[in-house]
Every structure is written in C-alpha cells, then in structure tokens.
Image (cartoon, rainbow, N blue to C red):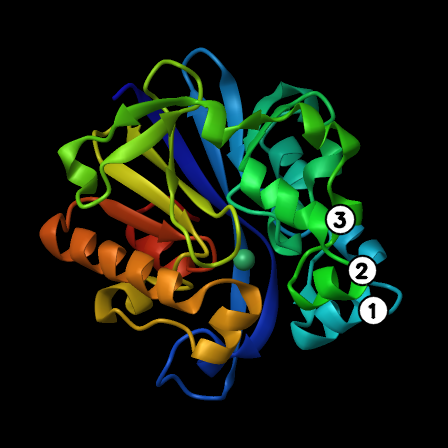
Amino acid sequence: MKRSSLEIVECGHCRHAEAMTRRGATWRGVDFPALVGVIHHAQEGVILYDTGYDAAFMDATRALPERLYRLATPVTLAPGESIVDQLATRGIPADAVRHIILSHFHGDHVAGLHNFPHATLHCACAGLRDLRARSRFGSARRGLLPALVPDRIDQAAFFEDATPVALPAAFQPFDRGADLLGDASLLAVELPGHCPGHWGLALRLEDDRYTLLVGDAAWSLTAIERNMPPPGLVARLLGDAAVQRSTLAALHRLHGGRPDTLLLPSHCSIAARQAGLQA
Ligand SMILES: [Zn+2]
C-alpha cells in the first residue's frame, strides 16, 4: 500500500449519555468529539475523511423537526473550530482540498461539505439513496440533514463503483477494499450496520502503520476492545443492530489479532491521541 500522512482534527463536539453509545456504560453526560481525518497524499494533496460540525449544522437544525436532532445531542462548536477554519490556520486554503471521503451521511460528518465546492466527493451510493428516501421527520430522527449535502453529490465517486482490491493481511478479518484513487493508497472498507452505506477507510501511514478509520462502526476504542455494541434501541433507530454487532465483533477480532493496526473511531480522541495523530 502506498503511504500517506494523517492528522486527526476535532471539529466541535456533542454531549450525550455514555450509555447511549455503549452497553453497560454510565448515564453521565460525556463529550463526543466530531473528528476529521486530514490526509496528505503525495500526488493528490489534501484529502478529508468526513467534515465534522460546522456553522451550517446550526442553521440546518434551527427549525423543527430538524431541531429535535440538536436537542437530542447538544452541539458545541467554538469559533474557528470548523475544519475549513482549522485548515486555514495550517495554511491550507479550501481549494487545496482535492477529495472528501464520507464515511456516511449523518449530520456531524457532512456539515462542513459546503466549504469545499471544488473537492471530488466519494461516498456510498447506498447511503445517498437512503438519504433521498426519507421524509423530513424520518431524516431528522435518524441524524440525517439533507440540507447539508450539496446537489453535486450526484456526481460523487461511489465506493460501490471503485475497483475492488484485496486488503493487506494487517486488516484481517476484513479482506476487501475499494481502491478510491486507483493507486492502492486509500481503500474504502464497508463497515455495515451503523446506518445504510457506512464505510471506513484503510490507509498506510508514512511510518508504516496500517490504519483503519472506522467512522461510527464503534464510538470508542474501548467499545472495540471490549466488543461492546451500543444499546439495541439506538442501533435499531439508526441502522441494523445485528449487522452492527457483527461488524464490531470483526473489529474486535482485528484489534486482538493485529494490535499494531490502528483503529480510529470518528468520536474517540483517546484512540487518536494514543496513536500520536491528534494534538
Ligand atoms: Zn453516525
């Protein structure tokens, strides 16, 4: 696998009971950061995995029924914390982002999309179909905010159409990926269950570490280590609880069998900091 560099950046956070995300956890409120993967690719430059919270999320959840989403998971976004602002402080203008890879269409993953009108979008066709199939209320209760997704998503490169390739053994038991750029650097990996069209991203870092960005297939590294899925009620509301459990069990096996492979959930700063990828 061709190597890339990776930085994990927090773009706002929401707060809800830990027990909503992991069975056996407490009901105390905990912060769930919305993390964005900033990938530097030798030829293609800056590539994002998801886009985190953005002021657009606040606009899209001002009225009912979308406001219910924000009430369920209160969001904090400090000034300058959106991904476009944080890239700017690193000297990276929005136009320098050539590709955006979406793990799935939940609002906390797509809110920053509108800032990058020139990036090629990569997503699951199944996720886009699901986004389009729902009523306003049905969308909001599933964490979907279609207003945050630009119309040009119709011209996205779909994971389902990318060339299927074998994954390196470092990702066993996951064995198939979709080669997004055609150079074996970024391989999308289907991680089903969280919601329709949910995919992770496999890459190899410049220091050789194999890394799997797992999106919301698990909300924390602890959940993977202990093989503890979210409560059935939450899993069923968003996706398919049984399929999510089997994806989590596969991640648990990967973690046990290949402890050197980095597993990075979208809402777990502990994992990203342990890996030395988040400030
Ligand atoms: Zn999600």
Helix, strand or loop for disc 1? loop
Give the quarter of the image for residue 122.
top right
Q: Please, is residue 185 above or below residue 214 in the view?
A: above
Q: Please, is residue 58 above or below residue 25 in the view?
A: above
Q: Which of marks 3 and 2 is nearer the N terminus?
A: 2
Label number found at residue 272: none
Residue receiving disc 1: 65
Q: Nearer the viewer, residue 128 or 227?
A: 128
Q: Which residue is drawn at 17% across and 43% down?
A: 172
Residue receiving disc 3: 146
Residue 223, position as x, y percentages in the image: 32, 68
Helix, strand or loop for disc 2? helix
Residue receiving disc 2: 136
**Alpha carbon distance from label 1 to label 3:** 13 Å
- Disc 3 marks which amino acid? Pro
**Alpha carbon distance from label 3 to label 2:** 9 Å
- Disc 1 marks which amino acid? Pro
Q: Residue at x 62, y 26 (%)?
A: 156
Helix, strand or loop for disc 3? helix
Q: Earlier in the sequence, mark 1 or mark 2?
A: 1
